[in-house]
Image: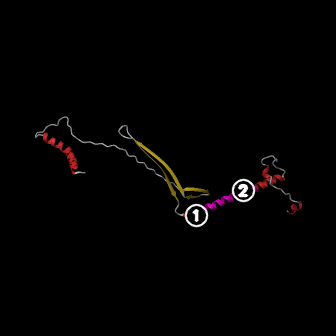
């Protein structure tokens, strides 16, 4: 910036403050006067306008994935989260001199969570294997109980001459049951 231009700006700023003071000093007299009913005081003013738009995306990872296996057994495992986002904003005014502006953002946020203690994961997996084996054993036992009850009931029915009609859908329930009648010698031994 050249010195002449700088001095000119300083003089302009000082003159805004000095002129009203000089005018007051020159117009005042030694005796007291009342102020005129209309007083004009020069005061520079400036205004500015603008707008700011703050946009943010917050990605909350949430808890680990939870797998539940029954019997109170549940294990947390690693997770990956995928969160797409899109935002837009616009601004403008009714003044034809101003321009409308628009902005938009799109993106994707990825998050990876994994447990830091692998030994806890292995303990949980071992407990899951035990729980699955226990559940399978219970299912096998229930199936065996069903088949034994079917065997006894169908055998009693066959011995008593009771059976489903061959065209009945339930005829197949006892179709594989074989009843052997004991011989007289076997009955005497008992």
| 78 with respect to 165 (left or right) | left
Q: Nearer the viewer, residue 179 or 50?
A: 50
Question: Horizontal placement of 85 versus 185: left or right?
Answer: left
Residue 39 place in picture, x, y as percent:
20, 37
Between 187 and 8, the residue placed more toward the observer is 8
- Which residue position holds label 1? 122
Q: Main secondary structure of the magenta part?
A: helix
User: Which residue: 70% across, 58% down?
Assistant: 140
Helix, strand or loop under label 2: helix
Where residue 68 appears, as percent x and y from the top left, is: 59, 56
What residue did someone put label 2 on?
Answer: 143
Range drawn in magenta: 121-147
Give the camera-side residue of 122 and 156.
122
User: Residue 157: horizontal and vertical position, in percent?
Assistant: 81, 52
Q: Residue at horizontal 79%, vertical 49%?
A: 171
On screen, residue 95 above or below 187: above
- Is 140 magenta? The answer is yes
Circle 1 SS class: helix
Which label lies toward us, 1 or 2? 1
């Amino acid at each position: 910036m050249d010195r002449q231009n700088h001095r000119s700006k300083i003089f302009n700023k000082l003159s805004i403050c000095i002129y009203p003071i000089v005018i007051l000093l020159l117009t005042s007299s030694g005796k007291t006067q009342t102020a005129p009913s209309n007083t004009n005081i020069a005061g520079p003013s400036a205004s500015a306008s603008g707008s700011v738009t703050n946009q943010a995306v917050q990605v909350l990872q949430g808890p680990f994935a939870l797998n539940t296996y029954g019997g109170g057994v549940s294990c947390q495992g690693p997770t990956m989260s995928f969160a797409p986002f899109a935002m837009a904003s616009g601004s403008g005014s009714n003044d034809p001199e101003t321009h409308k502006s628009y902005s938009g953002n799109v993106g994707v946020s990825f998050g990876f969570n994994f447990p830091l203690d692998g030994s806890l994961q292995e303990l949980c997996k071992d407990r899951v294997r035990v729980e699955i084996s226990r559940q399978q054993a219970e299912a096998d036992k229930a199936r065996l109980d069903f088949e034994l009850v079917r065997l006894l009931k169908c055998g009693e029915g066959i011995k008593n001459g009771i059976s489903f009609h061959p065209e009945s859908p339930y005829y197949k329930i006892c179709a594989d049951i074989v009843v052997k009648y004991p011989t007289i010698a076997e009955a005497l031994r008992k």
